[in-house]
Image (cartoon, grey):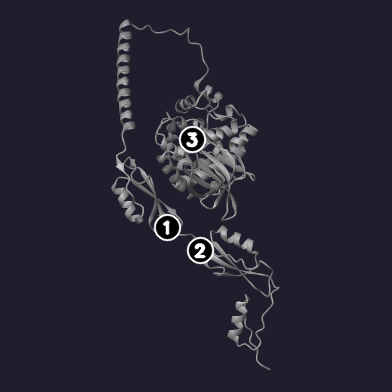
Amino acid sequence: MTQQARLLGGRYQLGELLGYGGMAEVHLGRDLRLGRDVAIKMLRVDLARDATFQARFRREAQNAASLNHPAIVAVYDTGEERGEEGVALPYIVMEYVNGRTLKEVLAAEGRIMPRRALEIVADTCAALNFSHRHGIIHRDIKPGNVMLTRSGQVKVMDFGIARALASGTSTMTATSAVIGTAQYLSPEQARGETVDARSDVYATGCVLYELMCGQPPFIGDNPVSVAYQHVREDPNPPSELSPEISPDVDAVVLKALAKNPANRYQNAGEMRADLLRAAAGRPVEATPVLSLEERTQLIGPPGRHADRPVARVSDEGRRRATNWALIAVAMLAVFALVALVTGLWLANAQPDIVVPDVRGMTVEKAVKTLEDKGLSPKDYNVWGGCDKGKITKQDPGYGEKVNEGTPVRIGVCQGYKTHKLPDVIGDDVADAKKALEKLNFNTQVEYVNAPVGTKDEVRRTDPEAGVKLAEEKTVKLFVSLGNTVKVPSVVGYNQDAAEDALTDAGFEVSVVTREAE
């Protein structure tokens, strides 16, 4: 990127490269308007050439921007920059987090003590539960997408971005959908089936397993072999690798890693509750796992049976048993064939409902329009400069083909957020601007002469402190030039003329009336 193109959107200064992954580069950036450091993620050029992927990337980034949670890396803004050959390069402006990813922590420390791992994953679940309630599935939870700040706070990254990538590849046969995430894929993801919040629960269970044991639940020579294990094989209890792990923690992990989504925690909130119970040493809701010794006691030790008399079976009995066995096998084969054909037919069924355009409609009209099409509308709030009460976003977008009953997320404009104007009188102008811009107010500074107060001190604001004001509105700051200014003489003026003369000179005027002696 050339030096001339290093300012994005006329606001964000692109800085040093912080890291890169399979689909994007992340740079340190500077928001020149608000004077803060940010992280800027830019889509790779080769992926940006795919118009469908671009559209999904932008839409998902906008959805992620609606998530405001202390354990989620905040998305401040989105946009696009023209790259070489005129290709549009979408970018996302995010909160800059000074810390390490769990992947980096594991590389340095090998594993994390169980209690601390439970706390980290409980905070991760809090972020996921919040995003799920807002209709956003992460789809790519892994140690590389969870950060710890210098103070130990959890920050989950890349909400919605993995969903954009998954939408561009329908099955696991696409290499880009496997490499880098296979160790944390849910069985339904590995089979190319529809995912929901329980898929994130499964991936979170994989992360917890790796934090405590130093390795994920399944390891293989290649991504496909790992994906196969997710679908077909049961994980060993974590305590078999780390004996200090309690049976209750085993139970939590193995419930999260259940093959059937119906047997997992049904949402991240349920998993978080059990994690907190386990961390506090209280009994968990998940069914405890039997130890090897307990399983052996239930089955019983192997005994001597060879010297017991065995009844002789006639040839006729053998033939009958063989015939019945063949019939049973044939029936099972028929059922299996029917199930296979039905499954293939369902898998290949093509979506036939075209999503209508509901942008600009009222909520009531949009809901009716979508329901009439057999779709399931889910609304959420959008803040900013838009037509209040109208639909401003939708996902899936207009013209996409979906199946009956597909959820359609519709963003309802709430207008600008309002804040009570803080009292900054007496503050230094730089501190006052920072406090106001933190609330997304614009500021305008006017320097005035003042007989009292130090230089650069705020003497007055317009509007006054305490007034409720919408974001993006301008607050005028009247700032002192210092008290070294000559006061003009108004002796002999009437009151109105005196006030005008002093005001024109930049002074704030107050009138004191005295009776003539």
- Rendered-image quadrant of the N terminus: top right
> Earlier along the polypeptide chain: callout 1 or callout 2?
1
Residue mark closest to the camera, 3 vs 1: 1
The amino acid sitting under disc 3 is: Tyr
Residue mark closest to the camera, 2 vs 3: 2
Residue occupied by mark 2: 473
> Separation of disc 3 and disc 1 at Cα?
38 Å
Outermost residue, right direction?
484
> Separation of disc 1 and disc 2 at Cα?
15 Å
Instruction: Provide residue 235's location: percent of width, then percent of height.
Output: 51, 27
Residue occupied by mark 1: 386
Seen in the picture, residue 360 relative to 479 is either above or below; the reply is: above
- Quarter-wise, where is residue 261 in the image? top left
> Earlier along the polypeptide chain: callout 2 or callout 3?
3
Residue occupied by mark 3: 202
Do labels 3 and 1 touch, CB within 8 Å? no
> Separation of disc 2 and disc 3 at Cα?
45 Å
**Label disc, if present, on residue 107 of the rendered structure:** none
Q: Specify few, some or many for label 3: CA neighbours under 10 Å numbering under 14, 14-19, or 20 or more.
A: many
Pick the front one: 457 or 435: 457
- Give the side of residue 55 with respect to residue 17, left or right: left
Instruction: Work out whether residue 51 can be spotted.
Output: yes
Pick the front one: 48 or 296: 48
SS for callout 1: loop
- Give the side of residue 336 with respect to residue 256, left or right: left
